[in-house]
Image (tube, grey):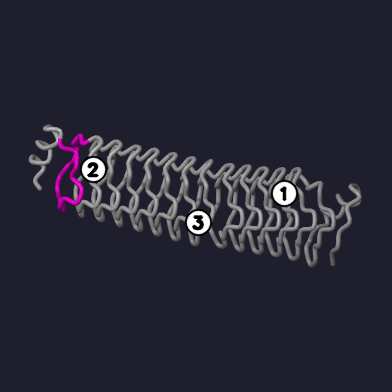
């Protein structure tokens, strides 16, 4: 269908375009508020800067489509195919994208605040600078996605797949990441203050210069984790496995290490020594400063 025919129908009050073949159509900058495009074929279509607020695109084919700077708040994109689509700067606040296919899509600086992305496939997507505050990402696939400087404060990531994600400089304050697998993930300079990482798998994770104030790492596996120059004030590392972790120049003011395993760790140049280190195991670890502190605090350490 040609652009001018569709716009004429819209002006006449027509709103149902479900199932239409609109492959490659140029709808850049148009206003089609509240239209029904469910199951429509929009492969390769140009919807850049279009106004589609509260429209229904559920099940539509939008792979390789251009939706840059589109206005689609409160839209329905459930089960929509957006593979390799361009959503740079798109406005999708409060939109429903459950089970949407967004692998390889470009969502740079897009706004998906309060959006529902449960079980969506975002593998390999460019999510640099994206706004996902309070978004639902439960069960979402984010493997190999680039979330550099992304804003995820208040988002839910229960059951999300996060292998090889890049979280450099991301905002994850207060996020619940209980039991997730973030092994080997880059979280350098990320903001995670108040986040919950209980029981998480964080083997080899990079927390260099990250803000981790008050983070709950209880029972987490942090083997080979890098905390160089990280801020861990008031963090809870109780019963965590910290074997071979690097705490060089980390701020550990008020951090708790009760029951933690600190075998072969690096603890040079504390900003301030931790005060809660009861029953810590510190085999083959140079913790001379920590030992001296423990004598004054009445802490029992096992070390060799």
Crowding near the residue tagged with mark 2, few <14, some 14–19, many ≥20 C-alpha atoms within 10 Å? many
Residue under label 3, please give it. 160
Report whether 240 appears left or right of 178.
Answer: right
Q: Earlier in the sequence, mark 1 or mark 2?
A: 2
Report whether 297 appears left or right of 90.
Answer: right
Report whether 9 appears left or right of 113.
Answer: left
Q: Nearer the viewer, mark 3 or mark 1?
A: 3
Q: Earlier in the sequence, mark 3 or mark 1?
A: 3
Q: Nearer the viewer, mark 1 or mark 2?
A: 2
Residue 113 against residue 289 in the figure, above or below: above
* Region rendered in magenta: 14-32
Q: Nearer the viewer, mark 2 or mark 3?
A: 2
- Camera-side residue: 207 or 183? 183
- Image coordinates of residue 70 in percent, x first then y, are 28, 40
Residue under label 2, please give it. 36
At 26% across and 52% down in the image, what residue appears? Answer: 60
Query: Under tag 2, what secondary structure?
Result: loop
Magenta-span inclusion, residue 182: no
Query: Under tag 1, what secondary structure?
Result: loop
Residue under label 1, please give it. 236
Q: Quadrant of residue 51?
A: top left
**Residue 67, disc:** none
Quadrant location, the C terminus:
bottom right
Q: Earlier in the sequence, mark 2 or mark 3?
A: 2
At 91% across and 50% down in the image, what residue appears? Answer: 298
């Amino acid at each position: 269908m040609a652009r001018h025919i569709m716009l004429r129908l819209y002006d006449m009050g027509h709103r149902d375009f479900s199932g239409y073949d609109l492959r490659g159509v140029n709808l850049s900058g148009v206003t089609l508020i509240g239209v029904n495009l469910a199951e429509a074929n929009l492969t390769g279509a140009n919807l850049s800067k279009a106004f589609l607020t509260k429209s229904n695109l559920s099940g539509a084919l939008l792979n390789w489509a251009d939706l840059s700077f589109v206005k689609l708040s409160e839209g329905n994109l459930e089960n929509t195919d957006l593979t390799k689509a361009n959503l740079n700067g798109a406005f999708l606040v409060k939109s429903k994208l459950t089970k949407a296919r967004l692998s390889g899509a470009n969502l740079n600086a897009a706004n998906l605040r309060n959006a529902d992305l449960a079980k969506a496939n975002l593998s390999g997507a460019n999510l640099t600078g994206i706004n996902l505050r309070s978004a639902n990402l439960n069960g979402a696939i984010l493997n190999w996605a680039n979330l550099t400087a992304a804003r995820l404060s208040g988002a839910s990531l229960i059951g999300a797949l996060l292998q090889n994600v890049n979280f450099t400089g991301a905002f994850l304050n207060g996020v619940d990441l209980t039991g997730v697998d973030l092994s080997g993930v880059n979280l350098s300079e990320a903001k995670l203050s108040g986040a919950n990482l209980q029981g998480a798998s964080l083997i080899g994770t990079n927390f260099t210069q990250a803000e981790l104030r008050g983070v709950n790492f209880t029972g987490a596996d942090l083997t080979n984790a890098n905390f160089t120059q990280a801020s861990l004030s008031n963090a809870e590392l109780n019963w965590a496995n910290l074997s071979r972790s690097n705490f060089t120049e980390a701020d550990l003011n008020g951090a708790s290490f009760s029951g933690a395993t600190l075998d072969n760790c690096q603890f040079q140049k504390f900003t301030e020594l931790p005060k809660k280190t009861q029953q810590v195991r510190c085999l083959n670890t140079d913790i001379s400063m920590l030992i001296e502190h423990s004598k004054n605090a009445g802490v029992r350490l096992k070390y060799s």
